[in-house]
Amino acid sequence: MRCFSPSLFRQFWGLLPQYVSVGPSRNPNLSPKQSSLRKNCSARPRLMTAPDVVSYWQNVFEKNGIPEARESSEYIVSFVLGAKTFQSLDSKKLCAPLTAVQQEQIQQLSCKRLERMPVQYVLGEWDFQDLNLKMRPPVFIPRPETEDLISLIVEEESRKCEAKNSALSVAIPSPVILEVGCGSGAIALSLLCKIPQSRVLAVDKEETAVDLTRENVHRLQLQDRIHILHHNVSYGSAKLLLPWGPMDFIVSNPPYVFHEDMASLDAEILRYEDLDALDGGDDGMRVIKIILTLAPSLLKDSGSVFLEVDPRHPDLVEDWLCAHPDLLLTLRAVHKDFCGKPRFLHIQKRSR
């Protein structure tokens, strides 16, 4: 069974002119890499079932040096077949022959992956904390470890509520949260769902990120509890942000990659993601310092800052805070990620 009918294959050729040439002619200007991609994207494998297609594209990805070849292939095939994961496909879908249209869709998406486009962008959506979020370049893709950052804030809010309940019988006000650098809205929306009484101010300097956050907010019908602000947070931002405060929490997964490490990032990141969302300057603390400088004027007494950072940052941040005692901020805890690396900081404001 061929991958496409003749009409569908002609249509696919028209969609990918940079890869596919009609007939046996050769373009002398193509590099070996481009020639390899052209060959893969114009191939017509005689495959029938989902496992066959997964194996075929896994092999193509591996030959072209695509990371996580098996996972990439499984995600693409599952997506086209309407499932979240390959393992969740039932036996009927696993055994049924794929249609020409399905194979065409898989081939189109797989060719994007061959260009080192991250799977999240290839599919145009991704799950984070049980939320299905739209994704598109160059907006920063939320990483799995960031889910632990959400859990730390939820745990701290729960602890504070228990402490207040044991001391007082009055109603506890809804927590107000500021997120600096909202990207796709993954952190803000997760917190709104995990802390149902919370309200969030989400800020990002990139209009593409603000637009994507708004889209995801409306998809999840959470627009009544969030305000999204297009703003480049700087040392002078307190006056603009204070009308939504004072804050119980400031949370951020800021740009924290040391500038010297940027060139060594994966091709998927360097080609497609917003590098400003990653580059933290010479010490990786360019935005971290801004957030900590603003925090005392934005936080309630005993309010908290939660940051995702580079494993080298806990000591650097503690030294920086010691050098700025007027901020009245204390590094209360350092938490490790699922790889055992120090990744999350809990910084608390002291009472005067």
Image (tube, rainbow, N blue to C red):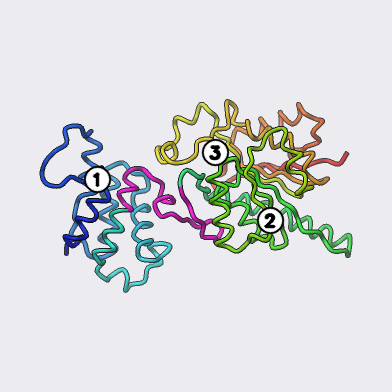
* Labels 1 and 2: the sequence-earlier one: 1
The secondary element bearing badge 1 is classed as loop
The secondary element bearing badge 2 is classed as helix
Q: Distance between the residues labelled 1 and 2?
A: 49 Å
Residue 139: horizontal and vertical position, in percent?
50, 45
For discs 1 and 2, the disc positioned in front in the rendered view? 1
Residue 1: horizontal and vertical position, in percent?
16, 64
Residue shown at 28%/54% (left/top)? 107
Instruction: Identify which amino acid the numbered label 1 is placed on.
Output: Pro
Residue shown at 21%/34% (left/top)? 30
Along the viewing direction, whichever of 307 and 286 lies nearer the viewer: 286
Residue 290: horizontal and vertical position, in percent?
68, 34
Instruction: Identify which amino acid the numbered label 3 is placed on.
Output: Ala
The residue under label 2 is 154
The residue under label 1 is 17
- Magenta residues? 109-136
The residue under label 3 is 277
* Labels 3 and 2: the sequence-earlier one: 2
Q: Distance between the residues labelled 1 and 3?
A: 32 Å
In the image, taking residue 147 as reference, residue 123 lies left or right, namely left
Asked whether residue 128 is drawn in magenta, I would say yes
Q: How far apart are marks 3 and 2 (CA)?
A: 24 Å
Along the viewing direction, whichever of 8 and 111 lies nearer the viewer: 8
* Labels 1 and 3: the sequence-earlier one: 1
In the image, taking residue 55 as reference, residue 44 lies left or right, namely left
